[in-house]
Amino acid sequence: MENFMNSNNVESNSSWAGALPVKQGLYNPDNEKDSCGVGFIANIKGEHSHRILKDASNILCNMTHRGATSADPRDGDGAGVMTGMPHTFMVEEAARLNITLPGQGEYAVGNVFLRPDEPHVHEQKSTFESIAQQIGLKVLGWRAVPVDNSILGPSAKSKEPSIQQPFVVLDPAVHNKFDNKLFNRQLYLLRKQATHAITLKNWFYICSLSNQNIVYKGQLSPVQVYDFFYDLQNHKYTTHFALVHSRFSTNTFPSWDRAQPMRWAAHNGEINTLRGNKNWMRAREGVMSSDYFGSDLQKLFPIIEEGGSDSSAFDNVLELLVVNGVLTLPEAIMMMLPEAWQSNANMEPEKKAWYEWAACLMEAYDGPALMTFSDGRYCGASLDRNGLRPCRFYKTTDGLMICASEVGTMNIAPERILEKGRLQPGKMLLVDTLEGRVVDDRELKLSIAARHNFRQWVDTQMLSIDDALANAPKFDMVASVDNVPLTQDPRLPAFKFTIEQLNLLLLPMTTDGKEALGSMGNDAPLACLSSEPQIVFDYFRQLFAQVTNPPIDPIREEIVMSLECYVGPEGNLLEMNAAQCHKLKLPTPVLTLSEMEAIKNFDITRADWTTRVIDITFAKSEGPAGYLPTLERVCAEVAAAVQDDVKIVILSDRGASADRVAISSLIATGGVHHYLVSEKKRSRVAIAVETAEAREVHHVCVLLGYGADMICPYLAQEAILKLHRENAIKSDAAPEKLIKNYVKATSNGILKVMSKMGISTLQSYKGAQIFEALGLDEPVIARSFAGTASRIRGVGWELLALDAFALHERAWPSRETIAVEGIPESGDYHWRNGAIPHINDPDGIANLQDAVRRKNDNAYEAYSRNAFEQIKACTLRGMLEFDFSKSTAIPVDEVEPWTEICKRFCTGAMSYGSISMEAHSTLSIAMNRIGGKSNSGEGGEDPARSTPKENGDSLRSSIKQIASGRFGVTSYYLSDAEEIQIKMAQGAKPGEGGELPGHKVSEEIGKTRHSTPGVGLISPPPHHDIYSIEDLKQLIYDAKAANPRARISVKLVSEVGVGVIASGVAKAKADHILISGHDGGTGASRWTGIKYAGLPWELGLAESHQTLVLNDLRGRVVVQTDGQIRTGRDVAIACLLGAEEWGFATTPLIALGCTMMRKCHLNTCPVGIATQDPYLREKFAGSPEHVINFFYYVAEELRTIMAKLGFRTINEMVGRTDVLMVDETRRNPKTANIDLSPILTPAFTLRPGAATFNVRKQEHMHHTRLDNKFISEAQDALNTGKRALPLEGDSNDYVGKGLSGGRLIVYPPKVSSFKSEENVIIGNTCLYGATSGKAFFSGIAAERFAVRNSGATAVVEGTGDHGCEYMTGGRVIVLGSTGRNFAAGMSGGIAYVLDLANDFVSKVNMEMVEFETVNDHEEIAWFKDTLEDHRHYTGSAIADRILKNMGEYLPKIVKVMPTDYRKVLEAQRAAKLAAANQKNDVVPAVLTAAPLAAKPKPNEPTLVDLEDSMVDAETYKKRSEMVDKVKGFMKYKRRGDAYRNPKKRTKDYKEISARLSDGELQVQAARCMDCGVPFCQSNATGCPIGNIIPKWNDLVFKNQWEEALNRLLMTNNFPEFTGRVCPAPCEGSCVLGINELPVAIKSIECAIIDRGFEMGWMKPRPPTLNKAGHLVTVYDRNDRFGGLLMYGIPNMKLDKGIVQRRIDLMAAEGINFVPNTHVGVTTDVNDIRSQNDALILATGATWPRDLPIANRNLDGIHFAMEFLQLNTQSLLDSELNDGKYISAKGKHVVVIGGGDTGCDCIATSLRHGAASIVNFELLPQPPATRAKDNPWPQFPRVFKQDYGHSEVQSHFGKDPREYSIVTKEFVSDGNGKVKGLNTIRVEWTQDASGRWSMKEMTGTEQYFQADLVLLSMGFMGPEAELLKAVGVKLDGRSNIETPKSSYHTSVSNVFAAGDARRGQSLIVWGINEGRQCAREVDEYLVGNTLLPVTGGLQQRSLKSLTFPAAATQQAAASF
Ligand code: SF4
Ligand code: SF4
């Protein structure tokens, strides 16, 4: 302990007594969390007694389980008690010290912690006394509080303070008369000033200092409090109330001050908005003034003291408000913890007005909170608006009010109880001990609301946005948009808008009013690593609630959410007047263009509401150095505006233009906000942000989080209006509606982001900074985002400025380069050739699948190498390398075997439902075989899977997950687990819930999840029943009780502070902790969640490991991590960072066949993995071996690394970050400043000696639990099946959680006098996730009764809010009133509610349910029976009354029926009836569960061919609108371009194919699935130029041909050629081709360009090099241009008119063509070289391969090219009339060599009229389908019949090809002419290494007649003369040599491209070579280039990331 605590004695530690360690590694004490149990007991009449104090001890001790202890049970986390002042006791104690106290109330006694050693005690006392004296107080003396410190644990003892009680009075020398108000004010001043002066870090802490109350507390466990403080045992110590608190801290550090109660309140829960509350409070200090405090007010600041907890911050503010005296204690509580008033239509208007007034002054302290409080007179409790903490109370006959976090804390005879209740959400329980009564919440709040006419204040003072709009000058939003077409709008690239954002994000928001869904996580690079310029928003990650507070469901629980806020200057918090309401009320912070305009013009109509626009752009001429000074200038202008009393400043980037660059709106907003906060001026002005940057929900949220009051995302809206104008939106809605939809989607998105953190109101979210920055440097954080965690530093001002300039350059380039047309792409969401990398790219996926299917080591190596490259580009671990220098390598044999390592592997929690049964069970089998673990996911699991198969395989998942949904969690499910995993959050969408739509809930899934097939399931955000750490502790306990053998795992997601949470989880006794990264996850989620929530696991894991070691908790838990773990290297790094187990989700799925389609949410997974469609499931081709092979490879790779590092076992390796280092060679200007040292801090140095891996089991103490006794006593009943559990008394939360059978009965004690139906009997969240059984509760249930019930029947006599929430089945009868939001998210089951007050309807959430009456006989009979049971078991009086008067009560029963559930039940009934009518006993199919993992019945879709049944244009239009793109690949047949009839077409030389019709093309385009990883586009196996196939397919589908053409031309200069002659490797690698025919890509490509020419869209535009401003001359030795295209390919395949059309166009575009120039022969190449700046050699590979065998010199033997060229030349010159060609007419033709050229020779010979045609192929005939060694997505080497072959077949009845044949010699006719060939057949064999060899087969010799032989065997390389003349170096294959990835030859200004450089290849490769060579030439000539890379995108070169030296100095000076 001492060693690591010593580090605390540094000045910077502001915690009390340096109790918390300083920030070190990734540990930060600011993240520490508390949670607790609270309670109080009060004598309502205010009578004092010692009994009360004693009873409070019971309450405290009985909440011990809500607190926690450290490793030593004597070290509690903290506990204490607040009481009224024990006057008699104090008088006597003072007298002992010779101090005479004045009368009660005229003196104060404090409890003060002092530094225990002299001289500190003395010094601190005297400072205290002298401050007291200065303010007119007198310290009469000090009493040392007697304590028994022998009971303290070592940790508590190490920081035990000296506890002293000062007796303080008003100094009689100054004040001659006692003034209570004055006394209290001065006491407050004394406390504040003494605390500021002496400071917490010097151990000084005032527990309380009051004349009314006193607080005793310390770092104690609850049971120690009374033993430690002798005072509390003294019977003379009397009080009228006692308020107790027991703390659960996440750490194990001694911190006496953090114990509670605080001075005024005690808090159970967590304040989520603390950062904002603190900032706003600080800002408010600037506008605070007080007559009461006068000039002393300044001495109170800061009101919120540093170094305290969230509870202490709350207490600080509460103290100010109460002491100030304008508000009473209950009023101050109401202001700080308001109930959910905004959406409550039933709230009294005056009360609402009060809340509205209060909201104008202060935001709520939001988060789960049960706040108990007292000022001596009032004693009470208040609950947060969500009711997220439990609070139960009893009122007794002897005048006591007992209130606590739970019932049962005190033993009270039932007959003493008058009333039992629970505190409802937002309500207050108040005992007024002066008036001697309990004040009803309604009465209290109405009386408070009646203090003034608040309604009138609000109505007269408040402005609304509608007022502003009504009074503003007329503004036409649509007309305000400029005329520039969207695709040419430079602002889009300037602000980094991409086409994906428009398509994927903006369009769905605009048309559907919702954010779009994505899936399969985020595998793109972190913003701080990406070389592409970023907008600052990209560096921010949203934080979310996990464990210590719950996220909220913003949809189903919208009643507590609000986006309303009041903006503008704030009033003085310390007053109460109408002017405080003078604010602008906004329903949402997102402003439309019209609203922004109205606000800008506010001052026209409201002279008192001046606004000022502040330009946040600066002159481009200032260069990057102008960036930071602009922020300074903006702040200064805002300050001036505030000075001028401007009410709204508008930070605007509308000034951005060619000459002006914008600073980031986020930098500006955060900068201005923090500047104003620090100047205490923030409360005087509202900040509006008018920005082009913000477009996504995340952007708006970050702006709000850093202080924006309102945001107008103007460019997003203008883009929508332009899209509408350009007919690019498939919606008939008016533009205004589209904008409204966008605002709605954004607003709902904000709610979702807020709710993730458990924040309900925007007011509290604003400025709360619920983000972590990843990769921003300290100066940036300090200036604009102070207080935000940014743990790895990174990008500073310079790079931010350079990014702004880079984006500006893309919009308004300084070079005269013609930019790529259209809106840029980025590949942020889907992998995109040429764009940013993704961890999962086509190469990686293909290699992995090849490796695991063929167990191909080479493929795994290629996979691993590729993965490493992507990891380097995308992740933090990519910067790390192993430091082998510190280790001694060992032989790999000494490392533990792979079979052992595999036991530490788990597959991810993918539920059956999200993936198919085939995929799910294959994973289980594989993991069971290797001893690893598969995870059921949260979807339950069929028990049948636990029975092993005959071959020993098991389909059982060892890990059973329980999450928010609690789907299918039965006792069996839990008992059958090896690990029970509690999912607190998930990587892809931490803090969010999900939904399984009804169509996905199949029979099997319905059965597994215990729900109704066809009815949708809603998962609330996890974990809806965990509101604090003690709830988790209970769930762990319960799960362990359900299965003591299973280890209990808690799944967390990486974010700042997760280490502290992990420590809390370890203290809560989890056995296993999983830290998930942000990037994993396979499920569907909104893109905002996928992209921006959570952090990399490297950070979360290292933080958790370090914090666990620091707390000495690491040895108690196993730590696992997951998130895009790919290889053994990743595992090794995860292990070194602290994980001893690792999870994999995406990669095993890829091994099983997943291609990262990212279409999981659409149920259309084409490989049968993420789908329930039987047709698609049939396509599943994975096997357990694939998964096993993957893990084998990973383990082996890991072992190799372990051996090199010298580790024999994993345990040795865990946490050894000392053998990791940052690889400095991988740094680049972007990553230069990233600091990974916090991650690499070795945890074992933080607390030497502490365990660093799991060494022991948690002590769950289950052997001592009461259940054991009950179970053993109930054994008989259990054995006989009579499972009933009756309870006479009360019960707390979670009764019947997961009930899966039996009967539960709870009823009040028989002797009770109260009415059961009016009193609370059970707590919150009862029957959560029950699946069957019955429950009878005679009394009222608290909040969330029967939440997620899916099968139990229950009777209860009233419920709180959110009753029957998310219910999916079962029946619930409520014999009394309910709270609000009944049936929210209820998709199944039925509720019957007795509505006596006739108000039930207003309390129901009607989103999914409807009302019915109960009149069906069967139903009435069931209802009666159930009530009879209820009466029988509980003796319920209300049930008795109803049963006796059914006629009277039945009409008052409202039946709540979910709409979808009703439909399904009706269908079931109809099916049943139909079956009965057929006299058939078969159970209706809908009720029958399919057998486990039954092979789905293939349901071959009916193929639709739209054209087949086409009738007229109108019908066509209608049908084409119905073309389905989502399932197009399943519905429509492939059709490529049709060839003309071979008999006819061979009579001419016209093109053989015809284009498809428009309709056909649309259908074909609909077959494209827009893959997440479009393999078609990959230049490795797909399209070499990276054609953007999915995009143009989509545009063709949408009939946007011109835009499709623009997309096509981005990558392809000559689509009309590739569309005709390319062999289409794209189609070979199309994902559809895995198990279907691929998309007809080539046909669509060709159609687009042909359409472009037809429509005249193909106007001259400069070709590549000319675009960059260069002049190009092309020389050709031929008379016509086009090379191979002109003369090498016959006209029927490529019409020469088309070639000439392009040549003409290029000439018009500025290319200078010089024909008939044989450079190197007729013209000196060096002349040309010297006349030009650069020379490109693109001569092609024209040196044909010869066949030098006997008689080669005979006549009639020609090279194919000679034959083809002469033919085309003659055809073009004379229609073949000039005879200048080699005719095949009447000849026997043999073509030697296949390929395209061979085929062209065949087809040409046929057209000449050849007598016979034979084609020799050396290789064997390819197989009909892919061979094993030719897996997808490689180019398929399969048998194909090309056009020439089919023509010959149709003419001669036989395919011309002969395979495996070798020509031995040509045979002469004796006249020097060839007459035939002698051949022999060969056999091909493959050796073990895969190498092929050929052997001639004797006896197969054959003679072939031939008088024309055409040699078509390819080319050897370029012709030599020219190359020799230039002097370029050649490579071994005689091609021109250039360095890798370069086109620059060995000669200075000479470049080479095409076949001359790369050897013979495809035309499309030639195009790519030309484009990339042009790029290099441009860069060579100019020094930089904007020409695109392969794939058509501009890419920033990291070379450009240099900041001008002068600017660096200037920027540095500003920091
Ligand atoms: S150029 Fe070739 S590979 Fe590329 S899309 Fe067109 S046909 Fe496919
Ligand atoms: S063409 Fe094929 S691989 Fe390419 S996106 Fe479409 S379906 Fe996917």
Image: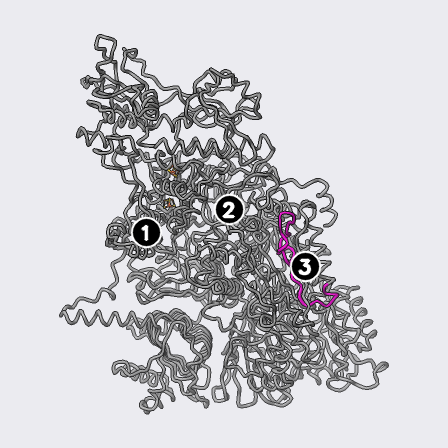
Question: Between tags 1 and 3, which lies in front?
Answer: 3
Q: Earlier in the sequence, mark 3 or mark 2?
A: 3
Q: Is residue 21 visible?
A: no
Decide: is 920 above or below 867: below
Question: Is residue 1741 visible in the rendered structure shown here?
Answer: yes
At x 46%, y 84%, the residue is 1319
Quadrant for the N terminus in the image: bottom right
Residue 82: horizontal and vertical position, in percent? 64, 77
Region in magenta: 641-670
- Marked residue nearer the N-terminal end (1 or 3): 3
Q: Is residue 1578 above or below residue 1949?
A: below
Q: Nearer the viewer, residue 1132 or 575?
A: 575
Q: What secondary structure is found at the residue carrying circle 2?
A: loop
From the viewer's side, name the closer residue of 668 and 1464.
668
Q: CA distance from mark 3 to mark 2?
A: 29 Å
Q: Position of residue 1720 (x, y in %)?
A: 48, 17
Amino acid carrying mark 2 in the image: Pro
Q: Of all residues shown, which one is farthest toward the top?
A: 1870
Q: State yes or no: residue 662 in magenta.
A: yes
Q: CA distance from mark 1 to mark 2?
A: 27 Å
Membership of 397 in magenta stretch: no
Q: Do residues under tags 1 and 3 come within 8 Å of each other at their CB atoms?
A: no
Residue identified by numbered label 1: 1528
Give whichever of discs 1 and 2 has the lower sequence position: 2
Q: Which residue is mark 2?
A: 824
The residue tagged 3 is: 614
